[in-house]
Amino acid sequence: MQKETADTGLQPLLPYVIPALFLVGWFVSSEFGVIPRYLLPHPVDVLRSGVAYIFGDSGQTQFSGRFLSDLGASVIRVLLGFLLAVVIGIPLGILSGRVAYVNRMVSTSINALRAVPGICWLPLAMVWFGIGLRTTVFLVALAAFFPIYLNAVAGARQVDPVLYRAGAMMGVTRLRAIFAILLPSAVPYIITGLRLGMGISWAYLVLGELTGVPNGLGAVIMDARMIGRTDIIVVGIILIAVAGRLFDLMLNQLMKICFKSARRR
Amino acid sequence: MKRNLKVVSSRGRPETRRNVLEINDLEKIFHADTGYLTVLKDISFSVEKGELICIIGRSGCGKTTLLNILAGFLPASKGRILLNGRPISTPGPDRCVVFQDHALFPWLTVRENIAFGTRRRGFTKKQVRTEVDRYLTLMGLNEFAGYLPREISGGMKQRVALARVLILNPEVLLMDEPFAALDAQTREDMQTLLLSLRKDFSNTILFVTHDVQEALTLSDRVLLMERGPGRIRENIPVTLPRPRIRDSQAFLACYRRLLAALKDG
């Protein structure tokens, strides 16, 4: 038997071991000049730039004062694209998983589209929607759709048929069964799809924002690259990582609030 | 072929001597890849109110198919089923099933599973609570009200499965080898429980089993089915006095006779 007390004492720290080791390595290699500063800036410089970017007043330095509007713009784009993917992906996925005809009709098309890397759509999307909100939302929605749809299909398929019978004999109509039986039973799969979709949403957000939009976390990275500010690029990367993780946690919590079957997994 | 349907009920309920269920010339054909498979043929029998009938037969004789048709899960290829004089075709709370593998909703607690069907029956919240409490006590599940199905034993799951349908007061209770997956001792306890419940409930019960001893312990009448295609070969009233004593001479004689008949099928 392992020593339980020692384990529980250190366990909460476990997720931070890798980031801490990374930080130490970064700090040491920067201190001893192993990596030149124009390639990877010193962590202290990054921290300073990050603080100025996030908390500084507008005009203090080149990037200060932008943070809130950048974050706001990015969050709106991610959420709009993600919600669009959810609104189309989950109902279509459930329908496709439950009704064989629908699945036969759509699965070939969807799998063909899925084979196209999302970045291919960027030039076309720019022609269609111009630069800005709509292009980014389009890219995010398109990319997030596939994991959400596919997991909804899988979730709807794995529902034990005997549960539908049990529901039917207790007076649950076919339509009601979607909400009373199918959804709760498929929720673990749907959550997986939503989390994957949310992660991809942030990736495609940056792709959409690299095209020259004036604000957004991706735009900051692109602007910083233009003038060679690697410290701000790193700040942008870290902020996107933090935002992505926070959204993932919020999504998980939200689903647990909404569904018993998510809480009782 | 019409069978002699005169029944000697050991329970003697003169005031309720009317047919709840009438099955006329039922036939079920499955369409397999290689052609047709007649699973049930010439099935005719009737069931009086409050009767406990065991349908017994070897595996593959179509007894579960028969039950599924009576429940409304499968359409009959031919023939008619009348419940209190009205033909039935779809599942409904007047004919509830206890499945072999409990079929409880895994994301709902014991209490919520028992209450599941009541939502659609116009109970008030308070009525639901008192009713569920009554059934929890009746089934000896009070301490487990807040548990999930995966956290309780097989016998308890079947008690929950029984409670969630009894609470709906179905006209006919269809039981599909409900105790077959339980260990011998638990099975005996469940049989005793079922018989003791019949003192308080007047539901008509059709009980599918392949266990001769179980059939003789429980039933007022045994329908013996034969294979290929599934037919009712014998309609045997069980006149043994209750409570049935498994090692009494009369019981053992019946047991040997029925077992021999079953082997011929």
Image (cartoon, rainbow, N blue to C red):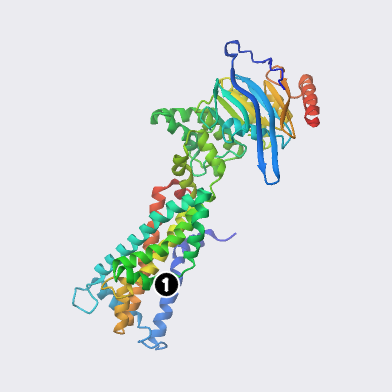
Name above or below for residue A43 compared with residue A12. below
Where residue A234 appears, as percent x and y from the top left, is 35, 77
Query: In the shown orientation, is residue A76 left or right of residue A164?
Result: left
Residue at image point 38% right, 83% down = A40
Give whichever of A201, B3 is nearer the camera.
B3
Q: Position of residue A27 (x, y in %)?
A: 39, 81
Task: Identify the element where label 1 is drawn.
Answer: helix
Residue B250 higher or lower than B40, as above or below: above
What is the quadrant of residue B10 in the picture? top right
Instruction: Say whether residue A63 is left or right of residue B29.
Output: left
Residue that badge 1 annotates: A120
Tag 1: amino acid:
Cys
In the displayed structure, B151 sits above or below A233; it is above
Quadrant of the snapshot with the C terminus of chain B: top right
Quick one: label 1, few (<14), some, or many (20+) residues within 10 Å?
few
Instruction: For the N terminus of chain B, give its image quadrant.
Output: top right
Residue A253: x and y in percent read 39, 54
